Image (tube, coloured by chain):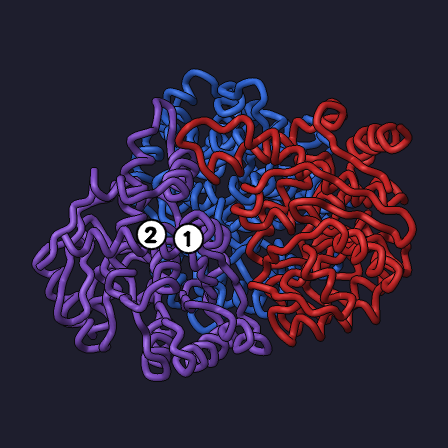
Chain colours: A red, B purple, C blue
Amino acid sequence: METYSKIEKLLIDINEKNPLVHHITNYVTTNDCANIVLAIGASPVMADAINEIEDIVSISNSLIINIGTLNDTKIESMIKAGIKANKLNIPVILDPVGISASKYRTETIKKLLKEINFSVIRGNLSEIKALCGIDSISKGVDSREDSCREGEKIALMAAKLHNTVIAITGAVDYISDGKKIITLHNGNKILTKVTGTGCMTTSLIGAFCGATQDYFLAATLGILTMSLSGEIAYDSLKEGDGIGSFKVKLMDSIYNFSIDDINKRGKIYEG
Amino acid sequence: METYSKIEKLLIDINEKNPLVHHITNYVTTNDCANIVLAIGASPVMADAINEIEDIVSISNSLIINIGTLNDTKIESMIKAGIKANKLNIPVILDPVGISASKYRTETIKKLLKEINFSVIRGNLSEIKALCGIDSISKGVDSREDSCREGEKIALMAAKLHNTVIAITGAVDYISDGKKIITLHNGNKILTKVTGTGCMTTSLIGAFCGATQDYFLAATLGILTMSLSGEIAYDSLKEGDGIGSFKVKLMDSIYNFSIDDINKRGKIYEG
Amino acid sequence: METYSKIEKLLIDINEKNPLVHHITNYVTTNDCANIVLAIGASPVMADAINEIEDIVSISNSLIINIGTLNDTKIESMIKAGIKANKLNIPVILDPVGISASKYRTETIKKLLKEINFSVIRGNLSEIKALCGIDSISKGVDSREDSCREGEKIALMAAKLHNTVIAITGAVDYISDGKKIITLHNGNKILTKVTGTGCMTTSLIGAFCGATQDYFLAATLGILTMSLSGEIAYDSLKEGDGIGSFKVKLMDSIYNFSIDDINKRGKIYEG
């Protein structure tokens, strides 16, 4: 299939190009995001000072904006960096972490969407629903509900509304550019028991966006890398292991991730 | 014994209620604190922006205030969040990290104690002594001395003085509400060789406080979870292992922690 | 050889003195830096609030200044802390992370070098070249080029220019005080695939600087500890392992590091 051969090429390209992925992100999951970017063959840089944000964007191949642990100074930097990236045609990826958890986050996302053109937005179903103005019961930064029909509908709707690629992650993942839709049926529930797997998925998407201009493909492969590596890591657990060992093996699996894993395990449905 | 059956119930309750634990904390140990909260069956949220602090507290089941890596903005958020939590009857847990290491920390703790009613305060012996105005030789954020009689006395005194549950952790742990006292004789010295085991213990206490109104019990079980998991993790180490493997196995043990571990290993003395 | 016996003594001294190592550093690698300092036998403290920076420096045995994730407030704290440390004869170690990645970083380093006397500066070749005003193609916070003759020349030049010990880390490491030069041929390429191994090396140097006044020796042993532990960790990897397992085993190896490792594997060339 065409998607598989494009994926194979992108896995080669990212290692050859070694894109630099600029993160303006939270202080909870930064270390894991940096390591996952290295594991997949790209290079991370974390920087949020307003005084250097344009310099750093200018040498980067993609920019990730993640709204966990926000503050006013960081928002200013996000906007400045996003506008600069748009000017330089550097893809910008948004992670609207816990968008409904506070009015401050909701308002910040509105501002960011107004000022910046995003190449990909990744969130869980309730976060992406919030982007469409649809209420959803949100608990902190996670959401639980999941309904296949609804996921497809919301992904398509949000992608059209914001003119971007939308990636909804959960038990089932949905990626849409407003026309096409891909559904992924991989992953393991234990991924929700490790903090930052959402942020890390966004970082993987950002890494792939730095190596191709096909952001729909980059979003698909980013999610696939995380969910398949999660499966592989889970399968290697032994008795007595828990989220400590799982997280180590997740990193290992991403470091060793290859097209073979996708050929063997990938459940990709194009619709 | 009554304590054991209450502990058993709380271990079930935390998984059913899945409390949301709001942290205003340092940037050194945040990731570990988030993962430990997930491992025990609760959900973490880290947020310190003054603009969203009240919204986040309002959807949370407990609030942890940890004074590592302080700054003026964060202190303002701590006070605002603490007052809001008090109004909503959400338990607030204090970790006075390195209280004697600087005048700034000492003064901050005074302010916090004046403005906020805490349900539990957890620290090492020298930190809790400082809360009682007793000088102690402090080295950075750790303390070394330990004397059983003294621990009991200080726990009782500090609990009465500040009208809260006091939890002193060390080679021996003391928990008191000003009347009752529990002494715990579990744990392993290697816990002091991993950064943030104190912060993580406070996070566990906060997680349990989100699932019961018996904060004395929550403090006891929080500490017990850490010290028994530390023992179990240590016992599983192989030749050549060190603090890297220990930390992974500590997370695993907390993820798999159950009433059986307490029945088998728990050294709980009620006095 | 004299160097070996001095190294053996320093490995004993650090465990006896248990120096307190104050870090003003980035929020990406803080946790790993704290754990590595504990692993080698010292104690970490991370603090950057201007209000407490002098108090914390005063109880510390060394101060590390790392310019990853800078901001104006932090720079002010760095300068205040550095000046205080100089007054108290506490060694100050600089890590000029990504110095050429932005004008802001370049200017900050100039300010720091003007205000503070550093005992050791550690960076990769392109970072140290930048300290000498020599342009180098920099990609984010890493550099790639390496040439043995050049490394020696630059280390000597930078040490003379800034009147300090210079430590250049890479495939080959160079340590110079402007007169002597030591070349180290240990390490493993996988160290570049884990974020923060540079910062962690600086933390190790800082830890050793807290236990001796021979900063040339401290820099040498700090680098040697990281590169030999990296070799040992790499050799213990099994099929399917990746950077997750490697990082765990790196921590283990540092925790278990001893003079035997140096005697067996050390490739130290004094020139």
Query: From the image, which quarter does the C terminus of chain A lie in?
Result: top right
Which three-letter amino acid code belongs to the residue tagged 1?
A: Asn
The Cα atoms of the two marked residues, 2 and 1, are separated by 7 Å
- The residue that mark 2 highlights is B11
Which three-letter amino acid code belongs to the residue tagged 2?
A: Leu
Query: From the image, which quarter does the N terminus of chain A lie in?
Result: top right
Pointer 2 indicates a residue of which chain? B
Q: How far from the left and from the top, in percent, is residue C268?
A: 51, 23
Q: A89 above or below C150?
A: below
Q: Residue at x 64, y 33 (%)?
A: A229
Which is more toward the observer, C7 or B40?
A: B40
- The residue that mark 1 highlights is B15
Identify the element where label 2 is drawn. Answer: helix
Q: How far from the left and from the top, in percent, is residue C256?
A: 37, 29
Instruction: Verify CB contact (< 8 Å) between mark 2 and mark 1.
Output: yes
Q: Residue at x 28, y 54 (%)?
A: B221
Tell me, yes or no, if residue A265 can be seen here. yes
